[in-house]
Amino acid sequence: MAKKVQLEKKTIARRASAKRAKAVVAPATPVRAPRKASAPKAERVVLTVQADPGSTVFLSGSFNNWDPAALKMIDKDGNGLYSVTVTLAPGIYEYKFVINGVWTLDPDPDRDWTQNGLGTLNSVLRVG
């Protein structure tokens, strides 16, 4: 008889433990996805270079696969100041001007330069 009482106590204890475990479990709540960080905004950048009026001037760089004729620069006033506006995501870009077919560094003293794989220099543009 004592064995039966012990078994009943164990059964009651298991049931009580199961009820406590069920009481602890909260209903599932929907999980919200974390907010996506907004992509850095692209910036409009105006690049200018002085050349002889009537020259053919292009901007070429890492942002356009170094295509020497992709971005034509314009001399609005006919005074030899050529400009072009590009929209670029934040980052570091290398570039050169192509003036009458000659690859030329940006003469702006505030621009950085870096050596390229051809043994010459490229101008450096930091956006953002």
Image (cartoon, rainbow, N blue to C red):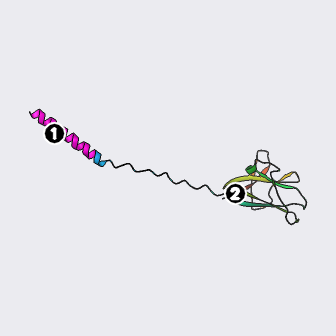
Mark 1 is on which residue type? Answer: Lys
Q: Earlier in the sequence, mark 1 or mark 2?
A: 1
Quarter of the image where one finds residue 16: top left
Q: Is the residue 11 above or below the residue 65 in the image?
A: above
How many numbered marks are there?
2
**In the image, what residue occupies the spot 50% across and 52% down?**
34
Name the foreground residue: 30 vs 75: 30
Image quadrant containing the C terminus: bottom right
Quarter of the image where one finds residue 99: bottom right
Q: Is the residue 86 above or below the residue 120 in the image?
A: below
User: Where residue 123 appears, x then y in whole percent?
Assistant: 76, 54
Mark 1 and mark 2: Cα distance apart in space: 76 Å
User: Where residue 50 appears, x then y in whole percent?
Assistant: 84, 62
Which label was assigned to residue 34?
none
Write down the residue under mark 1: 9
Number of residues whose C-alpha sits closer than 10 Å to that of mark 1, classed few (under 14), some (14–19) or many (20 or more): few
Name the foreground residue: 30 vs 102: 30
Write down the residue under mark 2: 126
Q: Is the residue 109 above or below the residue 11 in the image?
A: below
Number of residues whose C-alpha sits closer than 10 Å to that of mark 2, classed few (under 14), some (14–19) or many (20 or more): few
**In the image, what residue occupies the spot 72% across and 53% down?**
93
Image quadrant containing the N terminus: top left
In the image, the segment drawn in magenta is: 1-21
Q: Which dot, 1 or 2, sits closer to the camera? A: 1
Name the foreground residue: 104 vs 99: 99
- The secondary structure that most of the magenta stretch takes on is helix
Q: Secondary structure at mark 1?
A: helix
Query: Is 32 a magenta residue?
Result: no
**In the image, what residue occupies the spot 67% across and 57% down?**
42
User: Where residue 9 appears, x then y in whole percent?
Assistant: 15, 39
Mark 2 is on which residue type? Answer: Arg
Query: Is 3 a magenta residue?
Result: yes
